[in-house]
Amino acid sequence: MKTRIAAVLALAGCIGMAAMSTTAYAGMRGCGRASDYVVSANSKTSCGFARTVASKYANGSVNPRVYSDAARRHIRMTCSQFQGVQFVSCKGGNNAHVRLSK
């Protein structure tokens, strides 16, 4: 019985890690969804800022200018869509990094 419980817990842990990998990338944390994108951000970037980048990018701004509460100024983010891969990488400011995926 203990072996079966341990196996179920191990499987649950693997499933949880697989689900997490769809929302966050190495060195980044998941920030939820915005404008049909799954949003991730590095430790230098707030989730609110990252979701605003996603919204502006979705509305046609390829290099969105987004206000940062932390920096107290607007920051220009440079976004690149990678061919063959379903994600967009946006970088700018003081090492801010946002990833958007479908």
Image (tube, grey):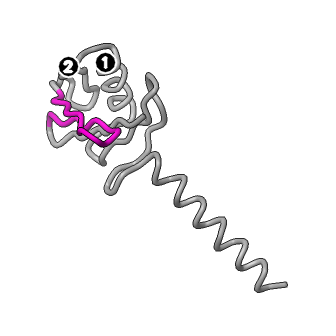
- Residue 65 occupies quadrant: top left
Q: Give amino acid for label 1.
A: Lys
- Residue 95 occupies quadrant: top left
Helix, strand or loop under label 2: strand
The residue indicated by pointer 1 is: 56
The quadrant the N terminus occupies is bottom right
Q: Give amino acid for label 2.
A: Arg
Magenta range is 77-93
Position of 44 compared to 16: left or right? left
Q: Position of residue 24 (x, y in %)?
A: 41, 49
Q: Are the residues flagged by discs 1 and 2 in contact, CB closer than 8 Å?
A: yes
Q: Main secondary structure of the magenta part?
A: strand
Position of 29 compared to 63: left or right? right
Which residue occupies the foreground of this view, 99 or 28? Answer: 99
**Image position of 27 with respect to 73: above or below:** below
Helix, strand or loop under label 1: helix
